[in-house]
Image: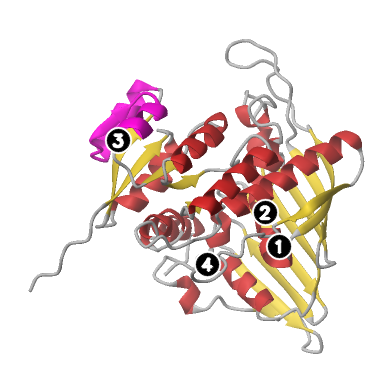
Amino acid sequence: MNATPQPTIRIGLIGTSWWADAMYLPALSSLSDVAVTAIAGRRPGPLAERASQWDIAATYADWRDMLDRADLDGVIIAAANSVHHPAALAALRRDLAVLCEKPLAGTAGEAHELAELADQRQAVTMVPFTYAFMPGFRWLRRLVREGYVGRVHHVGLRYHTGFGLDPAYNWKFDARRNPTGALGDIGSHFIHLAIELAGPISHVTAQMDTLGSRATTDPDGQSYPAASDAAILILGFEGGAQGVLHASAVAHEGTSMDQRHMIEVHGSAGTLAYKIDWDEVQIVTGSRVGEGPVRPLPIPDDIWGPVRRSPIHDTYRDVFRTTDAMARGWAQAIAPRRQVRPDFADGAAVQQVLEAALASSTSGRRVALDPPAGERPSARPRTGSPEMEPK
């Protein structure tokens, strides 16, 4: 007797950028029970190119038309920041699963609106904080949660990259399009990682500056308010731990990807450190109290899985294109309505911290978060681990 074939999960994609082409379309193309059946984009050339390259039958110039006319089970929102909230809201109201790029919305209030609606509808949602899926961070998080450092005292997170040294106009430093600048663009990832390691954030003190020199007019010749290209946050966690996060887009690192990440966790029983240079180095080191010098803690095979271990950019590709991480895991969770993380509640928590950081930097004062960012009010049961574990 032949097994009944499983129905195909139909995905609509909003956005035609290089990121959609590199991150989402390759990842979903190899899944036999998932298909991208519609795509929306305002630029005719890239829209036609993506549809032809990936055999997408239906194209739309307006994402609203796609949601109204296409028969979909889920939607991926990888378009301009201003599209995120209205498109996600419209998709949730149609009872669709939604994967939305960060920032989830323009304000913390809008982000929490989406998270609450997703919870009410029991929607399968995701905000793709990509670095949480890298093998080194997954190993670090596992060690912390298994008690390697004991009670967490403080965490230090550093994201340095040099793309902001380019003097040309960049929308990421245009406050009209990205009010929180480098913190929102790159630091948002590490806000999520901080919450993963030390729990909900209860207060924020921030200094956000524009240190680089770049064009003072946009491509249309209009002047624009500059957003910061470097930010330092002092974080207070609900559980009592301290944190420092430094996100800079004007830090030349001299690696192949011109970026370097470092996370340190100190606690009552020991210390851990995670370093990745996006070239060949992805390492976790640690020492427990009384054990002696810090030593490498090799990433276990069950975390590595089938992905290439170097160079690191190949690891990155393999994690998202061949394992159940991020888009692939989200898409495969739609039919069983299995909840995955990071979800809209996680995205809203990050948005809450971003908004507080901007307020703190503007006022020069510490900003309390009530409720703490990362505190999850819903008691709805969730399947699996707190964060998706790629297989």
Is the C-beta separation of discs 2 and 1 under 8 Å? yes
Assign the magenta stretch its main secondary structure: helix
Q: Is residue 55 magenta?
A: yes
Residue 77 appears anywhere in the view: no
Give the quarter of the image for residue 200. bottom right
Label 1: which residue?
263
Secondary structure of residue under mark 1: strand
Residue 282 relative to residue 366: left or right: left
Q: Which residues are magenta?
A: 43-69
Secondary structure of residue under mark 3: loop
Residue 357 appears anywhere in the view: yes
Residue closest to the far right: 365
**How far apart in space, not on screen, are marks 3 and 4 (Cα)?**
29 Å
Label 2: which residue?
190
Label 4: which residue?
382
Kind of residue at badge 3: Ala
> Within 10 angstroms of label 1, few (less than 14), some, or many (20 or more) residues?
many
